[in-house]
Amino acid sequence: MQIIEKDNVKWEEEFLHQDVPSITPYLIEEGRTAPIILVIPGGGYGHRAYHEGEPVAKWLNQNGFHACVLRYQVAPISQQETIEQAQQAIQTMKIKRTDWGLNDQHKIGVLGFSAGGHLAAIISNRYLESKGYTSRPDFQILCYPVITMDEFTHEGSKTNLLGENPDQQLIDQYSCEKIAHENTPPAFIWSTANDQSVLSVNSLKYAEVLQHYQIPYELHIYQDGRHGLGLADEHPNTVDWKQACTRWLSAYITEGEED
């Protein structure tokens, strides 16, 4: 897993496969125990959307959180290699905490949009264990996420990740509502009711299984908003997801921690 300093990132090449897999850190000076959040842009596993990457990391910095942006393999994807890349990114962040002047008090979470939300949810339920580090994140933030690879999926994401005509066993393995368990980390989830690209039923399915396992979660279904809003700065109602998310982080993730 490469670590690329943000000053050396050529964002105009974001849609290409250069420097994959890699993470770009966006660290803040203050906040000794502030969480570190891995930002995963969406793009249907076919590209990586810039507006769901660096701008989100900078927004997190402004609100007192460290961030890293993940560049992951998009189509063509060989044997779902993207999943392991995201798992390794979490492990790398845990390994690098000391080098970054942080310590193991710093919780590490994941924030993903659309197909990036699917990737975030997958690695929140399936972990790597190596070099003494687990890839399990401490929390997950899912923004209009693709959750299922079964009915109600986003077909482009499904095809790019699983290939043409995957069998039911593979579909089940990558449907997050079917692999959640009692050790799934807490979740903040939002979507919009009229999203025609990734139906909000994806978020509802995930919330239902989290409820079943009594995993703490907060779910917001906003009435209006096209798919791919990102920070949603231009949308007067859905933009509230940012305040709701930071409130949730303060209440359930950073509560009791010292700055």
Image (cartoon, rainbow, N blue to C red):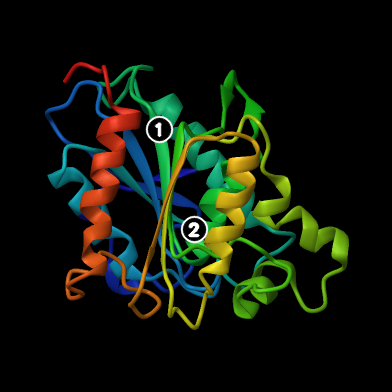
User: What amino acid does circle 2 point to?
Assistant: Gly
Using the numbered discs, state the Cα–Cα distance from disc 2 to disc 1 in whole angstroms. Answer: 16 Å
In percent of width and height, residue 240 lies at 22, 60
Rendered residue at 67%/72% (across/down):
158
Residue closest to the eye, 106 or 85: 106
Residue closest to the eye, 18 or 43: 43
The residue sitting at the bottom extreme is 196
Q: Are the residues tagged 2 and 1 within 8 Å (C-beta)?
A: no
Q: How many marks?
A: 2
Residue 73 seen in the current view: no
In percent of width and height, residue 233 lies at 18, 69
Q: Earlier in the sequence, mark 2 or mark 1?
A: 1
Residue 255 appears in which quarter of the rendering? top left
User: What amino acid does circle 1 point to?
Assistant: Ile
In percent of width and height, residue 38 lies at 39, 45
Q: Is residue 80 left or right of residue 253?
A: right
Residue closest to the eye, 97 or 159: 159
Residue 85 seen in the current view: yes
Query: What residue did someone put label 1 on?
Result: 108
Residue 28 appears in which quarter of the rendering? top left
Q: Is residue 232 above or below residue 196?
A: above
Q: Residues within 10 Å of mark 1 (few under 14, many from 20)?
A: many
Query: What residue did someone put label 2 on?
Result: 117
Q: Quadrant of the C terminus?
A: top left
Q: Is residue 174 left or right of residue 45?
A: right
Rendered residue at 19%/52% (across/down):
59
Rendered residue at 72%/73% (across/down):
151
